[in-house]
Amino acid sequence: MKFISIVVPVYNEEENIEFFYQEVCKHMEPLPYKFELLFVDDGSSDATPLLLEKISQQDSRVRGLIMARNYGHQLALTCGLDHADGDGVITMDGDMQHPPEMLPVLLAKWEEGFEVVQTIRISTEGVSWFKSVTSGLFYKLINAMSKVHIQEGGSDFRLLDKAVVQSFRRYKERARFIRGMIGAIGYRQALVEFVAPKRFAGTSKFSLRKMMHFALDGITAYSKLPLRFAFFMGLLFALISFAVTMHVVYIKLFTLEAVPGWATISASILFLGGLQLLGLGIIGEYVGRIFEEVKQRPLYLLRVELKQQQKE
Ligand code: UDP
Ligand code: MG
């Protein structure tokens, strides 16, 4: 019988875990698979780790990995994928926004021979207009800037075949945008649509700051276009200054007027100074990321591994 690992990153989800666990079991038990639920606790400060310990003691299909601190959703997913040995590995959120009813649909697509079954969120119930507008803009921006196409509404709810998981583990970068990585990894991919319901309980763990950081990770990891910005601006201003010089020479040689304009000079100096700092800032952003990557620190540390794997 095939073995399925379900990887679930959780961060302060004490109100959701129990219900989520029951719902997943309800939808997985009728199917002809052995499965494990692999919770990755992303440094929660509430009762989440205690609940995981309790559930994993009661049910041998439940495993818990407790990380040493909060590393963020993408690294928690990575940690889960590193430890999941199923023939198929499903990643999903623990707040019921990735509906467990979809599990049989993902598995059926996998049985058809697709090695990656990616879900697309066609809408989210009760999402703020701010989040939907910024998310739409982000996907337009990143697709305009990078070679890899990243599907709008793509979520981290997906099924990966064992072979894809093994390939994925060879990607060692720190700043991760797993959606983009999976898009670029290839294999036979299927898309499945779903409507994300509201969170079962609690609030979103993504602050505006975390979201902006995530967007920046996505853009810098997939595009070198911002780095070329200074080059194109330089070209543009070289052309403009050439035209202005011609104008000045013309006035000097062929007219009796003086060339006016200290105001123009200070405005253009300020403008170009601003542009130069902007260019430097962009370079700085990439250099900072190079610095983070070359340190080669471990991606995450595990504090406790609740129970060893039960696959037999
Ligand atoms: N999460 C995590 N680490 C974090 C933030 C979130 O492991 O730093 C988990 C969270 O517990 C949930 C999933 O990632 O299971 C998605 O987070 P959330 O529902 O807050 O994001 P949203 O659905 O609002 O985009
Ligand atoms: Mg959510």
Image: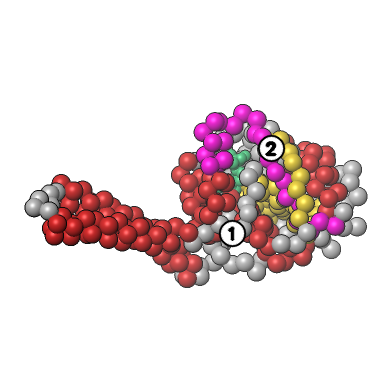
Which quadrant: the C terminus? bottom right
Position of 199 compared to 4: left or right?
left
Residue shown at the point (68%, 62%) measured from the top left: 185
Residue 303 vs 95, above or below: the answer is below
Check the image and report above or below for 117 versus 134. Answer: below
179 vs 264, left or right, is right
Given contact means CB atoms under 8 Å apart, are the residues at marks 2 and 1 in contact?
no
Residue at (43, 67) in percent of width and height: 291
Disc 2 secondary structure class: strand
Residue 274 lies within the magenta run:
no
- The disc, 2 or 1, on the residue closer to the chain's N-terminal end is 2
Q: Nearer the viewer, mark 2 or mark 1?
A: 1
User: Which amino acid does the dot numbered 2 rest on?
Assistant: Ile
Most foreground residue, 82 or 116: 116
Residue 36 on image: x %, y %: 78, 53
51 in relation to 247, above or below: above
Q: CA distance from mark 2 to mark 1?
A: 23 Å
Say whether residue 258 is visible: no
What residue do we see at 56% from left, 65% from top?
Answer: 173
Q: Residue at x 53, y 42 (%)?
A: 137
Q: Which residue is mark 1?
A: 147
Ligand 2 occupies quarter: top right
